[in-house]
Image (cartoon, coloured by chain):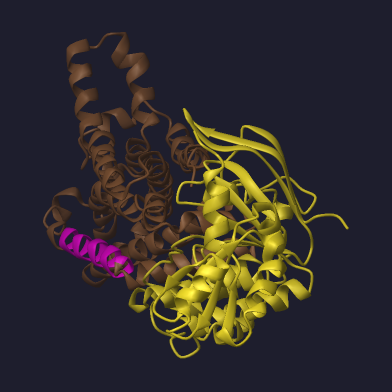
Amino acid sequence: MMPNLTLSHLTKRFGATRALHDVSFTVAPGERIALLGHNGAGKSTLMKIVLGLIPYDSGRVEVLGAAPGDRAARRQVAYLPENVAFHPALTGLEQIRTYLRLRGEPVRDAMGLLERVGLAEAAKRRIGTYSKGMRQRVGLAQALIGRPRLLVLDEPTSGLDPVSRREFYTTLDGLAAEGASILLSSHALTEVEARTDRIVILSRGAMVANAALAELRRQAALPILMQVRTTEAAADQVAARLGGARFNGATVTLSCAPDQKLARLGQVTALGSLVEDVEVIPPSLEDLYSHFSKQVQP
Amino acid sequence: MNAILAISAAEFRIAFRNRWVAIAIAMMAVFSLVLAGAGSAPTGTLGADRLSVTVASLTSLAVYLVPLVALLMSFDAIAGEVERGTLPLMLTYPLGRFEILLGKFIAHLLILSLAVAIGYGLAAGAAIWTDPRASAGFPAMFRLFWTSLLLGAAFVAIGYAISALARRPGAAAGLAIALWLVMIVLYDLGLLAAVVADDGGRFTTDIFPWLLVGNPADAFRLYNLAASEATAAAAGIGAAAHTIAPVHALASILLWPLLGLGLAVLAFRKVTP
């Protein structure tokens, strides 16, 4: 299947600063990609290039078979900027109606879109009176207009409460199921962990990771943490026999390489009644993120 | 086309909510009424009808007020979008930068035409009410109306170019006022000084008329004066009106809105969101 978005050896400099260096990846129809990176890692720059808002220096970018920013591409690409803003004098309904007309869609859809993002009640109030979260919802509503084949979402869930976040990701799942590609950036790693298919990590403009979460775990081979719960009396004995550290009275923690996990678990179960419970904690996305981000040094 | 009109509708609504529609109409109405009242004195001596005299006064007023209102409405058009952060999203929609400008242009021109029509309408009403012969001035009044719109269109478009070049509303406002001062006030004074210094030389005969007609405000004044003998007496640069063919002045006020829009598009293309 033809990818909806292709980046190949993309490079962009701002004067002496390297914003993006040799970045290559593709996004297939129906794929949800999380773009991670520190502030200034190049996420927003990459998105703006994909949207055709800023030019790039070298490499190749193809959006739905067209050049970025091409009118044909813009018709099928939706964008939600970071800290999205609207004119404060317009109401949410008027703003969405304007965007519908700009995309050649019927204005009667406006209320339905606002209902989808939970803004129906505030639809006739001026955006100037909205909270940050409400403005973000107007931004989401406009990104859902028509049937975009590629959604570029810069920190889409910032300012949203946990329930709204979940609803938002459910909406994205629906769009992806219909074949839309989604490229989103986020600082909330835990939500990205569960709701995206692949993770791309940028560090100082270079791509340091591009794989599904399980694959990233395998590549990083970070130690797995085990917490063995025992009794207070047996804690020292358990710690000594497993070679772990006593922690918090009745808990012993140990870490091991991923390929040693089963062997270690065997040792734990061999202790029999000394062990009350055991918890296996895989490296979190935060750990993986730090691991991959550290790889590139200036 | 629907997309352009969508921009216009939103822009008009914003101007209405921000009281710009009311401010523009009030400015034109107040000044027109004051002129209509003040213009009653010379009627008897000139022997012209009241409306023609009112048109002469309104021409002098429009030269100052129409460009001012136009620049005040337009200086924020692009710089404001940049400042609010609304520009990047707008530019990802499937319409060109020229279409965005055209949408705003239609809205601003509509507001201007409302203000001008109400202002001139009030002044004309006052003239007709007091002088039964006033209907003789209708053609001049109509000419003043559409040339005022062209003058306004030129300065709305120039305002967009300033807005795109400045990129910040504060700087754009300063530039707009400076431009108004230079093109409307200082330009004529400068030309006058040059003509005096030249003392009837080549500058006065060959260059001066073209410099005069090259300024849309002067071209507007010249065209309206040339078309009406009664108004010529009322204006300081009346003599110059005879050395320049009205068709040149007309060409200037027709071309300036297009030139302004061209400059605005060029400047807007250079704005990176």
- Magenta highlight: main SS: helix
Magenta stretch encompasses residue B24: yes
Chain B tint in image:
brown
Hey, which quadrant is residue B185 in on the image?
top left
- Is A213 above or below relative to B71? below
Q: Which residue is drawn at the image coordinates 59% and 68% (left, top)? A: A192
Residue A263's spot in the image, x, y percent?
71, 67
Which stretch appears magenta?
A: B20-36
Q: Quick one: A261 or A246, which is closer to the camera?
A: A246
Task: Give the image location of residue B126, x and y in percent.
Answer: 23, 69
Q: Is residue A183 left or right of residue A93?
A: right
Q: In this rendering, is residue A109 above or below A77?
A: below
Can you give x and y, in whole percent of width and height, for residue A44 in the image? Answer: 53, 51
Q: Foreground: B203 or A95? A: A95
- Of all chains in the rendering, the one displayed in yellow is A
Quadrant in which the N terminus of chain A appears: bottom right
| Any part of residue B94 in sight | yes
Say which residue appears at 50% left-offset and 37% top-offset.
B270
